[in-house]
Image (spheres, rainbow, N blue to C red):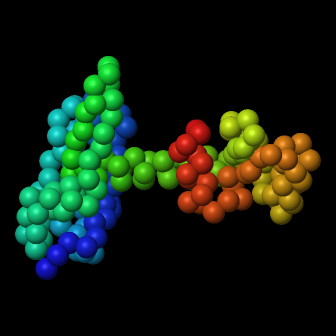
Amino acid sequence: MQISKLEVKNISHYARGSEETPCYNATVYVNGKKAVEVSNDGHGGSDRQHTYPQCAFNLREINDWCINTFGKETWEYNGKTYSTDLDLEHYCHQELYNWLDRKELKKELKGKYICFDEAKKEMFAFGKLKYKTENQDVVMKKILKDRHPTSKCLNFLDFEEALNVWKEFA
């Protein structure tokens, strides 16, 4: 049996406990089955990783799969190049940050029209009315067309596209 898919689910993030590393816990599913419980206290240490008894893989196999699948991350600092293997811990942190970004954007889109001016490469927002009206979206589209013709409103984009813009420019 081989690993073909990893998913991180059941994420709980504790922002107040996050100091040097994110304070969180989550469950990693391998091939759709509960496999590893991960957690971090947020004080700078590595994640704790515990496989469930029914998991068909050990941590080394899962880490090796991550490294072989995701490769290395490379960065420069003070003129030197560094790299690290993208193992299970890195994968979990990336998924945590993606989850946090999605959560934040959903919250922001509820109360505001978030717009991106493609020509200026900047974001701006308009508050939504506190009460719902059917015409609110129509009015906003007209305002953008008339006053901000080079802008896109994230609220009217596919969520994944809006998330990519949000991550890049927010």
The residue sitting at 87% across, 51% down in the picture is 145
Q: Position of residue 132 (x, y in %)?
A: 78, 57
In which quadrant of the rendered view does residue 117 lie? Answer: top right
Q: Position of residue 111 (x, y in %)?
A: 67, 47
**Name of the residue lying farthest toward the top:** 78
Q: Residue at x 21, y 59 (%)?
A: 68
Q: Quadrant of residue 139?
A: bottom right
Q: In this view, which residue lies farthest toward the right?
A: 146
User: Relative to residue 9, is residue 78 depicted above or below?
Assistant: above
Image coords of residue 170 (percent x, y) = 58, 38
How many numbered badges does the structure rendering display? 0
Q: Which quadrant does the N terminus fall into?
A: bottom left
Say which residue appears at 30% left-offset and 44% top-offset: 73
Residue 147 falls in which quadrant of the image? top right
Q: Position of residue 151 (x, y in %)?
A: 77, 46
- Horizontal side, residue 167 vs residue 123: left or right: left
Left or right, 18 with respect to 169, comes to left
Q: Nearer the viewer, residue 156 or 40?
A: 156
- Furthest-bottom residue in view? 1
Work out whether residue 134 or residue 104 is closer to the camera in this orientation and state it.
104
Is 147 rendered above or below residue 142? above
- Can residue 127 be seen in the rendering of this structure? no
Q: Is residue 69 left or right of residue 156?
A: left
Whether residue 91 appears in this view of the structure is yes
Q: Is residue 41 above or below residue 145?
A: above
Q: Residue drawn at (71%, 59%), measured in percent from left and top? A: 156
